[in-house]
Image: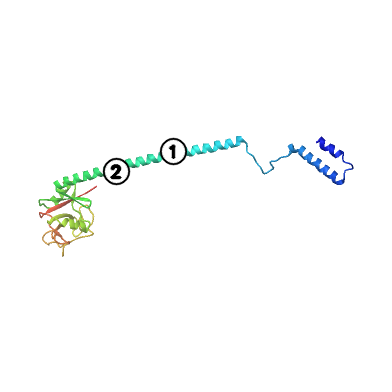
Amino acid sequence: MDQQLDIYANVEGPSDTDWKWTRERKQSENIYANEDEIDITGPALSVKSNSQWEMEMIQLQTSYNNLTEERDQLQTSYNNLVQERNQLQKRFEDMAKEKDYLWEKLQDLNRQQGWVYFSGSFYYISSLEKSWQDSRYDCLQRGADLVIINSREEQEFTRRFQKTVWIGLTDSATEGWWKWVDGTPLTTSYWAQSEPNGVPIRDEDCAEIKMYHLENSWNDESCDHQRFWICESKWV
């Protein structure tokens, strides 16, 4: 800088141009002299320190670890549920097999004792003939009662034995008001033509399947007559 000042000092009569150049040069020198005071970042530029970056990395790593732990817990819960489902499925299959086995054994036992299964009930068809009251008593002793016919399918089932049998229907309590042995009134009937008709000299207060070759096969008869009978026991 001293050398440059000496050069300008030796110039004779500095012109306006030289003076202006010298002034600008000095101003430039002043700028460089004050460069330590200039804020080069500006108001919109933000620079993070190493400690701030490290803090954010730690927070991200912690969040990742928490998510990983939660994922592992959910996977463990899912695996436990799958295992429990498989155990329950196996238990259900084992119970179904056992039920089928017990059902077959029960069927065999019932067949040996004269019982037949149909549509939710077991039926016993007698090999002897008794009065209506004695027939019902026999059913009650077996934990059943005389058959109650609730559907056409059941009517068809009882006809197939091709026997004249007592059923659990009577109007002994009130003449002409037919009720089943469980106390329910008769709603759907399969009386044969002109039945029930009764006979003046005797009461015909008990119902039987007589014309079993016909769908409408019921007949009213004196309860003292000897007939085969059908017991019914509901399967629970």
Disc 2 marks a residue whose amino acid type is Phe
Q: Are marks 2 and 1 in contact (CB under 8 Å)?
A: no
- Circle 1 packing at 10 Å, graded few (<14), some (14-19), many (20+), is few
Disc 1 marks a residue whose amino acid type is Asp
Instruction: Note whether residue 57 is visible.
Output: yes
- Circle 2 packing at 10 Å, graded few (<14), some (14-19), many (20+), is few
Q: Which of 90 and 226 is in front in this view?
A: 90
SS at mark 2?
A: helix
Q: Nearer the viewer, mark 2 or mark 1?
A: 1
Q: In this view, does 81 lie to the left or right of 70?
A: left
* Residue 170 location (% of width, % of height): 18, 56
The quarter of the picture where residue 78 lies is: top left
* Residue 177 location (% of width, % of height): 20, 59
Instruction: State the CA–CA distance, disc 2 to disc 1.
Output: 30 Å
Instruction: Report the residue at 21% width, 50% height from top.
Output: 121
The residue wearing badge 1 is 72
Label annotation for residue 231: none
In the rendered image, which quarter contains the N terminus? top right
Instruction: Note whether residue 170 is visible.
Output: no
* Residue 38 location (% of width, % of height): 73, 39
Instruction: Report the residue at 80% width, 42% height from top.
Output: 25
* Residue 68 location (% of width, % of height): 47, 38
Instruction: Report the residue at 85% width, 39% height from top.
Output: 8
Q: Which of 47 and 200 is in front in this view?
A: 47
Count of residue discs? 2
Q: Which of 121 and 96 is in front in this view?
A: 96
The residue wearing badge 2 is 92
SS at mark 1?
A: helix
Closer to the chain start, of discs 2 and 1, is 1
